[in-house]
């Protein structure tokens, strides 16, 4: 009986990995089609001249937020937020920011750029991601308690922190993002 359960879990994991792979490929394709894998678009966003990246990401956040919470409301999915802390957020933001500043790409846009043949993204992005992940894994035991768990806020979501129904956070967030999208489009950016 236990072997059957383990076999079922393994086949579910394989299916989840396959689904994740296809969603990742689709995401990369859409990043490339949206133009956000191009270096000039990324630098334009950083200089606040080109808001293509913001528009693509805001659209993804709106779709994802509404989709996930709708599926949750229908009982089709359950959320499993990971615990977080101020220390891990600060260190992660610092590492991300330094990598973004040096290469001019985030991990997602770097992977998409590799897919379209950008050598700088392959050498700087993929090599940088692998090197950075290796260094982080090596240093993890040394910084786990001192840095990563500092300011621990657990595995709560914003609606749980506020003590409100999730839709009282989702709906205003969607309206704000949609408003920003229309405002940016009206400005011609």
Image (cartoon, grey):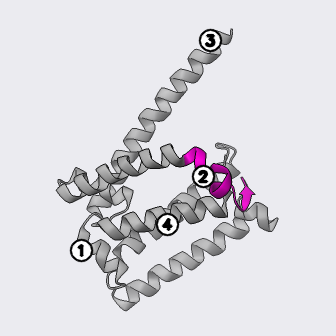
- Real-space Cα separation, disc 3 to disc 4, in angstroms: 45 Å
- Real-space Cα separation, disc 4 to disc 2, in angstroms: 15 Å
- Residue 94: which numbered mark, if any? 4
Tell which circle, 4 or 1, labels the residue nearer the N-terminal end. Answer: 1
Tell which circle, 3 or 4, labels the residue nearer the N-terminal end. Answer: 3
- Real-space Cα separation, disc 3 to disc 1, in angstroms: 53 Å
Query: Going 27% across and 57% down the picture, which residue do you hit?
Result: 124
Tell which circle, 2 or 1, labels the residue nearer the N-terminal end. Answer: 1
The residue wearing badge 3 is 4
The residue wearing badge 1 is 40
In contact (CB < 8 Å): disc 4 and disc 1? no
Residue 153 painted magenta = yes
What span is in magenta? 140-155
- Real-space Cα separation, disc 2 to disc 1, in angstroms: 36 Å
State the residue in front, 178 or 12. Answer: 12
Tell which circle, 4 or 2, labels the residue nearer the N-terminal end. Answer: 4
Residue 49 makes an appearance in the image: yes
Q: Nearer the viewer, mark 2 or mark 1?
A: 2
Residue at the farthest bottom position: 187
Query: Going 42% across and 33% down the picture, which residue do you hit?
Result: 18
Residue 157 drawn at (x, y percent): 71, 59
Location of residue 77 (image quadrant): top right
Left or right side of 146 for 90: left
The residue wearing badge 2 is 143
């Amino acid at each position: 009986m236990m072997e059957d359960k383990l076999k079922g879990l393994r086949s579910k994991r394989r299916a989840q990995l396959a689904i994740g792979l296809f969603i990742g490929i689709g995401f990369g394709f859409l990043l490339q089609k949206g133009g956000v894998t191009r270096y000039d678009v990324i630098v334009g966003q950083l200089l606040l001249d080109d808001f293509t990246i913001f528009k693509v990401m805001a659209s993804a956040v709106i779709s994802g937020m509404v989709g996930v919470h709708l599926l949750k409301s229908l009982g089709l999915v359950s959320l499993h937020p990971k615990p977080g802390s101020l220390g891990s957020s600060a260190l992660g933001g610092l590492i991300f920011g330094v990598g973004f500043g040096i290469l001019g790409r985030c991990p997602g846009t770097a992977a998409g750029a590799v897919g379209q043949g950008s050598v700088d993204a392959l050498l700087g992005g993929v090599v940088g991601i692998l090197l950075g992940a290796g260094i982080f894994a090596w240093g993890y035991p040394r910084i786990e308690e001192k840095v990563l768990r500092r300011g621990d806020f657990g595995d709560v979501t914003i609606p749980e922190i506020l003590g409100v129904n999730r839709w009282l956070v989702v709906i205003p967030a969607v309206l704000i993002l949609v408003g920003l999208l229309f405002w940016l489009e009206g400005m011609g950016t």
